[in-house]
Image (spheres, rainbow, N blue to C red):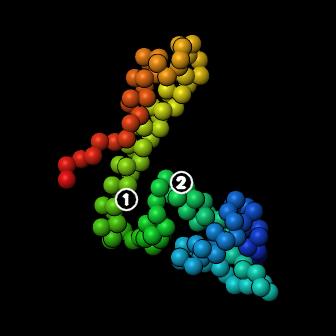
Amino acid sequence: MDTPLLDIAEVAQRSGLAPSALRFYEKKGLIASAGRNGLRRTYRPDVLDHLALITCARSAGFSVAEIGRFLVARPSDASLHVRMAAKARDLDEQLGRLTRLRDSLRHAAVCDHEPIVDCPEFKRAVGNVSAPAIGPA
């Protein structure tokens, strides 16, 4: 039995993405339509899994080109593995900064220092949130 196809409007609604984003991702080769129902694109239900991955990767700072390479990656693609490992390290650094920022905001929410930005604990936490140091050239 064939799985029913999803209309572009339904995919947009379920994924939270605009139809224009779906058309853009299709044009870039990140997703593929299954055909058309009249003038409207249709998609297989598994496109929602691809879109969830794309949305997550975009929010983590991956470019459309990087996502495209990732979606077609094979275990033998050594250079892609190196790029993925580097991106994972970047995400670890970003997570550390975001965690410190979250902690400083939590402190600020209960701090009674006047003004909050002069609180030594807040300053210490915010100082730890700065951008990562630039490594050797």
The correct choice, above or below, for 123 with respect to 63 in the image is above
Q: Which mark is residue 84?
A: 1
Tell me if mark 2 has few (under 14), some (14-19) or many (20+) residues whose alpha carbon lies within 10 angstroms of its own: few
The quarter holding residue 127 reads top left
At a point 29% along the width and 67% down the height, the residue shown is 78
For this orientation, the residue located farthest to the right is 38
Question: Disc 2 and disc 1: Cα gap in Å?
Answer: 16 Å
Image x and y of residue 85, in percent: 34, 55
The numbered mark at residue 24 is none
Looking at the picture, tell me which residue is in the foreground, 11 or 129: 129
Where is residue 38 shown, x and y percent of the image?
80, 86
Can residue 44 be seen at all in this image of the molecule?
Answer: no
**Left or right: 39 as drawn, with respect to 96:** right
Q: Secondary structure at mark 2?
A: helix
Which quarter of the image is occupied by the N terminus? bottom right
Q: Earlier in the sequence, mark 2 or mark 1?
A: 2
> Nearest the camera: 103 or 68?
103
| 85 or 132, nearer to the observer | 132
Q: Which residue is mark 2?
A: 59
| 117 lies above or below 47 | above
Q: Which residue sits furthest bottom?
A: 38
Is residue 25 in sight in this rendering? yes
- How many marks do you count on the picture? 2
Mark 2 and mark 1 residues within 8 Å of each other at the beta carbon: no
Residue at (50, 27) in percent of width and height: 103
Q: Going by the image, does 87 lie left or right of 98?
A: left
* Secondary structure under the numbered disc 1 in the rendered image: helix
Q: Image point 49% across, 26% down: which residue?
A: 104
Who's the residue at 67% across and 63% down the image? Answer: 17
